[in-house]
Image (cartoon, rainbow, N blue to C red):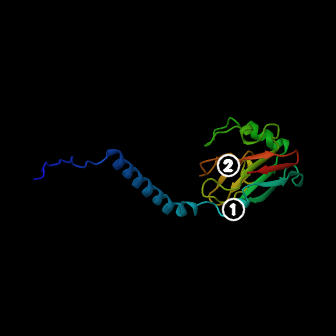
Amino acid sequence: MADTAQETHAPVQDDPSRRDFIYIAAIAAAAGGAVATVWPFVDQMNPSADTLALASVEYDLTKVEPGQQVVILWRKQPLFIRNRTPEQIAAAIKDDNAAMKDPQKDEARHKPGKAQWLILLGSCTHLGCVPTVGGGEYGGWFCPCHGSVYDTSGRIRKGPAPLNLAVPEYSFLSDTKVKIG
């Protein structure tokens, strides 16, 4: 008779490193799928091509006489470029320590050595209306919608607006040309 020795086999055990790899791979695939699903929704919130084309604008300052203001369109918003007179600058500096809702010195609202050039976003900080030039007792801007009054530095002095007119990022390319944005 043949020797009938029983062979014993050890039970097959799961390899823990293989199981961990499978879990990590499955989680990575699920995360990749989630990102691929969500990305189109996030990407559609980026600015459109026509808005990006207006991301920066250059303007020739020789077109603006002392005491005059021009309004140009930048990022679909009005932008005030004002060539302030020495009297307007002096009035703004004189009011640096006046009581204000949003205190800010005049020198912080323009580039050093270029006090005559004031560049501001032309949207009232209350509800986004466009203030008119020269209104109110401070010689700056007046928002007729709700009565906000700004001084010659664009700082809020009266009315419901909570903040000063915003100063955008800009730089002087030369003495006569400015780049906004």
Task: Residue 172: give x, y in percent of width and height.
Answer: 82, 45
Crowding at label 2, few (<14), some or many (≥20) Cα neighbours within 10 Å?
some
Q: Is residue 133 visible?
A: no
State the SS at label 2.
Answer: loop
Left or right: where 107 falls relative to 20: right
Q: Is residue 62 left or right of residue 55?
A: right
Q: Which mark is residue 150?
A: none
Looking at the rendered structure, the kind of residue marked 2 is Ala
Residue 96 in sight from this viewpoint: yes
- Front residue (pair 3, 174): 3
Q: Amino acid at mark 1?
A: Thr
Q: Residues within 10 Å of mark 1 (few under 14, many from 20)?
A: few
Closer to viewer: mark 1 or mark 2: 1
Is disc 1 placed on a helix, strand or loop?
A: helix
What x and y, as percent, mark residue 48?
65, 64
- Residue 132 placement: quadrant: bottom right
Tell me the distance, in whole angstroms, between the alpha carbons under discs 1 and 2.
19 Å
- Which x, y percent locates residue 101? 60, 43
Q: Residue at the spot x=75%, y=47% of the render?
A: 170
| Among the 4 quarters of the image, the one containing residue 87 | top right
**Residue at image x 63%, y 58%?**
128
User: In the image, residue 168 lies at what x, y percent?
Assistant: 71, 49
Q: Residue beneath label 1, please?
A: 51
Left or right position of 151 against 102: right
Q: Which residue is mark 2?
A: 166
